[in-house]
Amino acid sequence: MTSQVTLPIWIFLLLLAITAWAVLDRVMIPSVRWVLRRRINRVLDEIGSRLDIEIRPFQLTKRQVLIDRLVYDPKVIEAMQAHAQETGTPREVVQAEIQSYAKEIVPSFNAYLYFRIAYWLAKKVARSLYWVRIGLYSDDQYASVNPDSTVVFVMNHRSNMDYILVAFLAAERTTLSYAVGEWAKIWPLQTLIKAMGAYFVRRNSGNPLYRLVLQRYINMSTKEGVCQAVFLEGWLSRDGRLQQPKLGFVDYMLRNFRPEKDRDIVFIPVGLNYDRTLEDRTLLRALDPTAKKRSMFFVAKTTIWFICRNLWLMARNKWQRFGYACVNFGPPISAQEYCKEHDFSFSTLDRKIRFSEVEKLCKKLMASIEQIVPILPVSLVATVFLEDPEEWLSEFDVKAYVHRLIERLQSKGARVYLSKRSGEHTITTALNMLKLRRLIVESDGLFRADQESLPVLSYYANAIDHWHHHQQSSSPEG
């Protein structure tokens, strides 16, 4: 019994590795999972007591369960069989393709990451870059919304900061599930976005199978009451103006909606505006068909230079925020009430008529967004300089023009964000911002639009351009 057994060193190392893995798998990993699960449950209990719109069980369901539920959805199975017959492709191959779409779309929501990390980070980033302001119509209007409803925030899309800004401002009330474009499908951003409950969308995909899987997921999450955020324009505004609404996402939510049986879908219009949009010149460049496509190296180099320059200004205590970022929330619009008012159900309409009715609803939502898009100082000052780009104006002249413009807009019911107490200082700050960005030039105390920067000035003026076409409008309740 005291004899020795001699083993080769490689067998000893192998046995050591197996032992370490067994200890890790049976003791360490379960312990870590237990600690993490306990923390997550604690966060859920804490947050659930203060959220106006609670986290739905659907969001806490294991991701693989949701993927299987989507892959084996009756309508998806029917489409799979039809596609396999039409193309002669084995059903297993088509099903594997559908499963890859489901894995791409279905998020993996993590409440701890959302509220403890993402919320904190979004808050820090938003407040570091901008003076953030929020406007609500009336808390009473939101209190009247049935908490069992599916709430959908519909908003204009001016910047990629929209994701951060709205998620941060809405986090005290609910979690948001976004549709995110393919631009964010890079590691580790992809993992972070999925953990925050967002799902990826292939823009302009002509693949009918993919579109069906996406449609079924949106329909499924809507029926389960998941609070969502939809950019009604579909993509970023290139010229700063509000665009025509895209119908796809709203149609996916409503095509099977039965107002008499299903939980209500409540749309809340959201208007966003910024004194400075970080990607303004890039968006304008996209309008030029002759502009050469910039390489990833150029984009990365420019981004890094921009970040380093601002960090250097911060270190020298010379950095200034990029002005105001403002979000206004409009009055809720109930899908149930809308269907009762027009005496129909979206689920019973044929495709052509349904699209027509969805378009009418989307235009109503876009009209609500138009009413609440914040009118900020830079948009006002840019509008003044564009009235006569060749004219030289003193600071006094600019302020007088702005005040006349405010009176004209307010008479049409526009919501102008300009403090009466600090209005003069706010206009001066906006003027200095445009001067620092070389969008206006100064000579002997007089200012004029820089002729080469007129497209950028137009971009900011276009944010309130829709008000110049309003003949009559009642002032919304502030």
Image: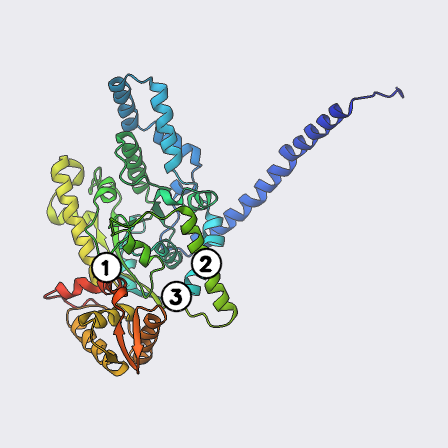
- Please name the residue that numbered disc 1 is placed on: 331
Secondary structure type for disc 3: loop
Label 2 sits on residue? 305
Q: Earlier in the sequence, mark 1 or mark 2?
A: 2
Percent coordinates x, y for residue 158 in the rendering: 29, 56
**Front position in the image: 281 or 356:** 281
**What kind of residue is marked 2?**
Trp
> Type of residue at label 3?
Tyr
Image x and y of residue 338, in percent: 16, 49
Image-quadrant location for residue 171: bottom left
Helix, strand or loop under label 1: loop
Q: Amino acid at mark 1?
A: Pro
> Which numbered disc, 1 or 2, marks the residue closer to the eye?
2
Near mark 2 (Cα within 10 A), the count class, few <14, some 14-19 or many ≥20, is few
Question: Cα distance, mark 1 to mark 2?
Answer: 42 Å
Name which of mark 1 and mark 3 comes first in the sequence.
3
| Residue at x 32% of width, y 51% of height | 147
Using residue 271 as the reference point, say whether residue 196 is left or right of it: right
Kindly report which numbered mark, 2 or 3, lies closer to the viewer in this rendering: 2
| Residue 353's disc number | none
Picture quadrant where residue 466 is located: bottom left
Q: Which of the pair 376/304 is nearer the observer?
A: 304
Q: Is residue 27 left or right of residue 188?
A: right
Separation of disc 1 and disc 3 at Cα?
26 Å
Residue tagged 3: 130
Q: Is residue 362 above or below residue 33?
A: below
The Cα–Cα distance between marks 2 and 3, rounded to whole angstroms, is 20 Å
> Crowding near pointer 1: few (<14 within 10 Å), some, many (20+)?
many
Percent of width and height locating residue 320: 42, 70
Q: Residue 177: horizontal and vertical position, in percent?
A: 36, 47
